[in-house]
Amino acid sequence: MAPDSRLSASPAKSGWRAWDASERGVQGCAVPVPSTLLLLLTYLTYLVLGTCVFWALESPAAHDSSKRFQRDKWALLRNFTCLDGQALDSLIRGIIEAYKNGDIVLGNTTSMGRWEFVGSFFFSVSTITTIGYGNLSPRTMAARLFCIFFALVGIPLNLVVLNRLGHCMQQGVHRCARRLGGAWKDPAKARWLAGSSALLSGLLLFLLLPPLLFNHMEGWTYVEGFYFSFVTLSTVGFGDYVIGMNPSRNYPLWYQNTVSLWILFGMAWLALIIKLILSLLEAPRESYSCYPQSSKGNFKPRSWSQGLDEEAGPHSPQPSCSPEGQHPEPSTQVSCCGKDS
């Protein structure tokens, strides 16, 4: 009797066919590019809407507060040439309150511009990404009420955008791995190389290089900049380090906008890495572990990647695994999850 062609096929070819089929499945679920662009456009439009509303509601109050503080400060200096304890305490409390409101008391500068367009945009980003540094908050009741509704819609929208961006990043990694696997005829090696490249490039772009920018713009050390990068991208947002808070420095307009884009794509990348770590941590508890069964009833655990990549004899059955209620092909004797098929 002629041997089964499925068992006599080359293990490497069968492994490549399995990898190619899985990649075709990923490509079959590809998200159209126009819908992704439309989603990003909607996301950006929503951010601009929030920016304009916060700018319109908070900017006049911020300017009034700044002018009022400057007027009170100079009146105090004219009336009290030698300050007593109570007047000094009053001045200190005023300085603290002015700093919280974004007002500056050094030289002729009266405001840090936190509620200008750029500052309002950065506040909108920190709101819907749930970072919430805590260094800035709405003061007017109208802005507080709008912030509630803005966050109710913006937070789910932000999650959808991050999920879509992460999916696009994952598709790019799969595409690179498939091309490398076709060139090298080694899917496992291609997967590891593509995954490692994505991890290292993300580390470089989102965690290792940004501290150099913060060192130049904020005067932080590299460790402080790295700490701020991770605390921001992980949405912990302690607020002990926040960009654009040094009154003695002049910040260009592109600075906070660039940091806002870095936050968006960095959060998508970090979410993808956290998802990968969670999948690795949950892998030992999966119920889809495969155990090839020998004729003597001995069981040997075997991973999915080993089933695709390891060499096997021409007549040795290939391990497979299927969920409950589905059985492997009759030509392969496999016991999945410790139960006979």
Image (cartoon, grey):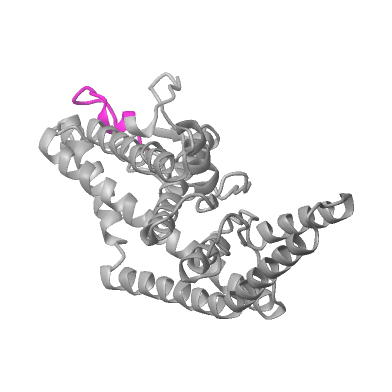
Magenta-span inclusion, residue 317: yes
The residue at the point 31 percent across, 65 percent down is 31
**253 to 64, vertically: above or below:** above
x then y, percent, for residue 135:
63, 56
Location of the N terminus by quadrant is top left
Residue 340 in view of the camera: no
Residue at position x 33%, y 50% from top?
170
Is residue 135 visible in the rendered structure shown here? yes
Of residues 164 and 42, the one drawn nearer to the viewer in this rendering: 42
Quadrant placement of the C terminus: top left
Q: Is residue 225 above or below residue 126?
A: above
As drawn, is 113 to the left or to the right of 76?
Answer: left
> Which x, y percent locates residue 257?
40, 61
Asked if the stretch drawn in magenta spans residue 3, the answer is: no
Image position of 308 (left or right of 121): left
Circle count: 0
User: x, y (%) of residue 194?
Assistant: 26, 38
27 vs 187: above or below: below
Q: Is residue 177 above or below residue 251?
A: above
* Quadrant in the picture for residue 166: bottom left
Furthest toward the left, the residue is 183
The residue nearer to you, when weighing 161 against 175, is 161
Pick the front one: 195 or 287? 195
Which residue appears at 52% of the width and 68% of the height? 120
Residue 244 image offset from top left, x and y in percent: 50, 53
The overriding secondary structure of the stretch rendered in magenta is: loop
- The answer to whether 78 appears left or right of 220 in the picture is right
Q: Which portion, as a residue range, is magenta?
A: 306-320
